[in-house]
Amino acid sequence: MTRHYMMHYLPTVDEAAIDGVLADWQVRHPKLGVCALLPEAYKAGVAVLQAVCVRRNIPLVGGIFPELVRDGEFCKGGVWLLCFAEMPYFALYADLPTDPAGVERVAGEMNAGIRAQLDHTPNITLFLLFDAMVPNIGTLLDYLYLSLANRVHYAGGNAGSETFQPLPCLFDGQRTVQNGVLLMLLKNHHGAILEHGYREPAETVYATATLGNRISQIDWRPAFEVYQELVRAHYGVEITPGNFYQYAVHFPFGILRANHHVVVRIPVMLAEDGSLFCVGEVPSNSLLTLLKAPAVDSNETMRVLTEGLATLNGGPVGAELLLLYCAGRRMHLGMEAATAELREFVKRTRALQVAGAVSLGEIGGSTVNGYPLFHNATLVASRWHKE
């Protein structure tokens, strides 16, 4: 029997090649939809994808990421086409507000749209792709969970540029937007597995003054001053404003949760007043610890991912898997170690294909049915839809 793939990688964004793949899928799946993943270097390909899908009347969604993941390699070029046998419910929001009233309003719109689609299907995944420039992802996840609770699984990640410069990076068949979110409701889907493998050091401090993703004080002192002291004392490295961007990715914060799970936050910008900006919000009075690259347990990360996948949708062997790999983790570990993780993931899962992207933050819970959190430095893995 011929195996029909639901994921297809093309090395170039060629209109004729895309049309050929979609033509084959459309014969088997008259109601199909497509999710496309593009690397930043090929962002101009969005218009090509939109034109082909409009011509064939195929719903399209997708995102632009720093790079793609293809099996055991990172790819700077090409496009992943991911097939839905039938297009799921999706919504694309642009220019998300940050003021409390605006956040509550747009979260209410999202929740109303999602709730209208929920039925008695036992396993539904809310898959979210945010623009990495959105500063209040955690707050929006809180609003979603307050309305939806455990009626859905939560998974996703961030699109955008690894330079953290504004980039329209989320799209559907007509629009390409920035500072927004693309959400998809995947039915008969058991969610995703998320893991980072960081070990937890003993010393902790408190983030005593924060606003969104900005830490201005740690233990009531300027945040950068305390950060410098922690890195110097524990790892013998002198971080200065001049070398901050070179070293900070190697020394992320860990937010310690009540369940002992560590949520990673990578500092990506230093303000003149000594405040630190992270990828993702840091709640006020968060209990923080300092993490370091050698403390990452890749073996434990792979074990959690593969054993977790074995419990979802029939297991990963011979399946087509979706994988998001954090850009900060790759910088933190280095390209050689990060590529080794990808290859080990393919080896352990024995997947038919692994499609994915380098993400700028990831969404998931510490357990499959857990509270959704916004993470850094993780891998998020799930099985793609069966035909």
Image (cartoon, rainbow, N blue to C red):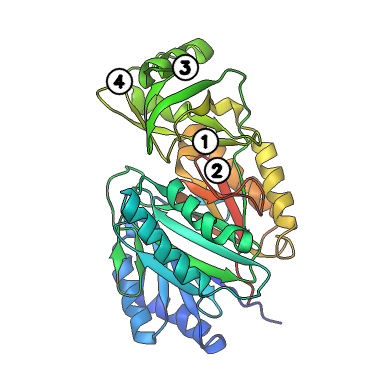
Q: What residue did someone put label 1 on?
A: 264
Q: How far apart are marks 3 and 1 (CA)?
A: 16 Å
- In the rendered image, is residue 79 in sight? no
- In the rendered image, is residue 338 in sight? yes
Q: Which of marks 2 and 1 is in front?
A: 1
Q: Residues within 10 Å of mark 2 (few under 14, many from 20)?
A: many
Q: How far apart are marks 2 and 1 (CA)?
A: 8 Å
Q: Which amino acid does label 3 sit on?
A: Val
Which label is found at residue 241? 4
Q: Which of marks 3 and 1 is in front?
A: 1
Q: How crowded is mark 1: few (under 14 residues within 10 Å), some or many (20 or more)?
A: many
Q: Marks 4 and 1: CB-CB under 8 Å?
A: no
Which label is found at residue 378? 2
Question: Residue at point 67% right, 65% down?
Answer: 319
Image position of 300 with respect to 208: above or below = below
Q: Marks 2 and 1: CB-CB under 8 Å?
A: yes
- Taking the image as shown, residue 298 lies to the left or right of residue 334, namely right
Element on which disc 1 rests: strand
Which label is found at residue 231? 3
Q: Distance between the residues labelled 4 and 2?
A: 27 Å
Q: Which amino acid does label 1 sit on?
A: Val
Q: Residues within 10 Å of mark 4 (few under 14, many from 20)?
A: few
Q: Which of marks 4 and 2 is nearer the N terminus?
A: 4
Q: Earlier in the sequence, mark 2 or mark 1?
A: 1
